[in-house]
Image (cartoon, rainbow, N blue to C red):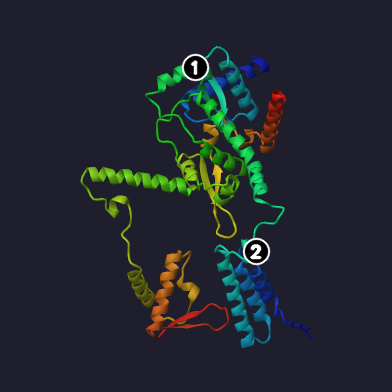
Amino acid sequence: MTQESSSAETKTEITRILESLLILSAEPISTDEICRLLNVREKEVQEAFRSLQSHYEREHGFRLIRIAGGWQLATAPELSEVVSRFRENIQNPPLRLSRAALETLSVVAYKQPVTRAEIEEIRGVRSDKVLETLLRLGLIRIAGRKKGTGTPLLFRTTASFLDAFNLDSISDLPSLQDLEDSRQAEDAFLVEERQ
Amino acid sequence: MAFEIELEEFSGPLDLLCRLVETGEIHASRIQVNDLIRTYSSYLLHEKALPFRTVSEFIALTARLLLGKVRGLFPQPCSDADLQPERSDENPDELLRAAIVRYRPFRRAAMVLASKLEERQRFVVRQVEEDRRLYDYGDLFGLSRLWWDLLDSRGSASKDAGERLTDEMLGFEAIETDFLLVERRMLELEDSLKGRGPVSLRAVFPGKATRRAFIVTLLALLELARQGKLKILQEDPFGDPGIQFS
């Protein structure tokens, strides 16, 4: 057997193992976890994940998505309607968040670690109840106390937050500057349209 | 010979530090009183003479510093300046506009999050069959929430079954009053130290004593001293005190 064919076999084997683990797992699987489990290099695992990802994109009901720092099998988004009709009776209702909760969550996501007073200063309204809801939903967590007078609690987003918002990591969010620039560009476009 | 300067305003570095804390030029929370006392007391001990006045000044200044720290924990009362209207260049409209401009990107970020949430909900994943881990390491809020939820469900289950939820069922140890603990510790100390020569105070706290054990032992020693059963002696200033049973 040539070295080339042996390497191809290893790659196929890793891909098959990944597929079986992905079917079993209800949580995202990280590349590190697989490297440790199979004692293989990160590059090989990533290649295997990518080859599976492109495989499922073609005529399959599955997608391999990158989420919360790992990989997870999910149903194809274009099938969401039929899937949701099917799972209606067997699953919890999907997460619904008020505008206040989303805005508070965005402040935590961009300013973390952040105190309640800092959130309220940015939002201009009291946010204790919203923070309580976000804590209860597991989207944010208490991440220690800020040094200084009163040592207030600091809040951070959680891995569940990444999972719920289709993010691999927090850096996947656009920067605040980008958001402001895109808003200004949209405003300018609307002004031009009106003229 | 050391060259000493005394100013009318300040009588030493500690006095200056107190003044800076009191005027708000240094935030009280930034000062480690522990370290300060250790450094200053070791400096005082190196002096040949330790006049009573110097020691009393030191205690008074440390107390001032502690008072500054305590005051720092409370909201500061409004000064006249705070009650004055904002500077002319910061009119309310401008401030409101600035707050809106600062908040605008976050509102937009909230819209991004909403679309991401919707996008994510179109991907359906396998559901966890067993209980998901409800808290991260160090997340005391999550842990306490989990604990109270378990307690509530246990409580309602017991209520349905007509049982009364007892401390034993909840896994709580029977609570022993501090008074009984001190009394028991007094007997232990008397048994172990009576008839022996002076024993160092450190020896009475073996290994890593918990805060509760430390306080109970200290109270027991003070009570025994009050009853005249033992003497507490300290030969050197800031030295380890010795304990001698009568």
> What quarter of the picture does the C terminus of chain B occupy?
bottom left
Which residue is painted at 54% across and 54% down in the image?
A152
Please state which amino acid type lies under the numbered disc 1.
Leu
* Viewer can see residue A117: yes
Which of the numbered marks, if any, corresponds to residue B81?
A: 2
To which quarter of the image does residue B76 belong? bottom right
SS for callout 1 = helix
Residue A62's place in the image compared with B63, above or below, is above
Residue A104 image point, x, y percent: 55, 41
* Viewer can see residue A114: no
SS for callout 2 = helix
Residue A79 image point, x, y percent: 49, 17
Circles 2 and 1 on the same subunit = no
Q: CA distance from mark 2 to mark 1?
A: 63 Å
| Residues at circles 2 and 1 in contact by the CB criterion of under 8 Å | no
Which residue is painted at 58% across and 16% down in the image?
A55
Left or right side of B95 for A151:
left
Which chain does tag 2 point to?
B
Which residue is painted at 46% across and 42% down in the image?
A133
To which quarter of the image does residue A94 belong? top left
- Which residue, as the protein is rendered here, is positioned at the far front? A195
Q: Which residue is mark 1?
A: A79
Please state which amino acid type lies under the numbered disc 2.
Ala
Packing grade of label 2 (10 A; few <14, some 14-19, many >=20) is few
Mark closer to the observer (2, 1): 2
Which residue is painted at 43% across and 30% down in the image?
B128
- Which residue, as the protein is rendered here, is positioned at the far left? B162
Which of the pair B41/B32 is nearer the observer? B32
Left or right side of A23 for A55:
right
Residue A144 image point, x, y percent: 54, 51
Which of the pair B56/B192 is nearer the observer? B56
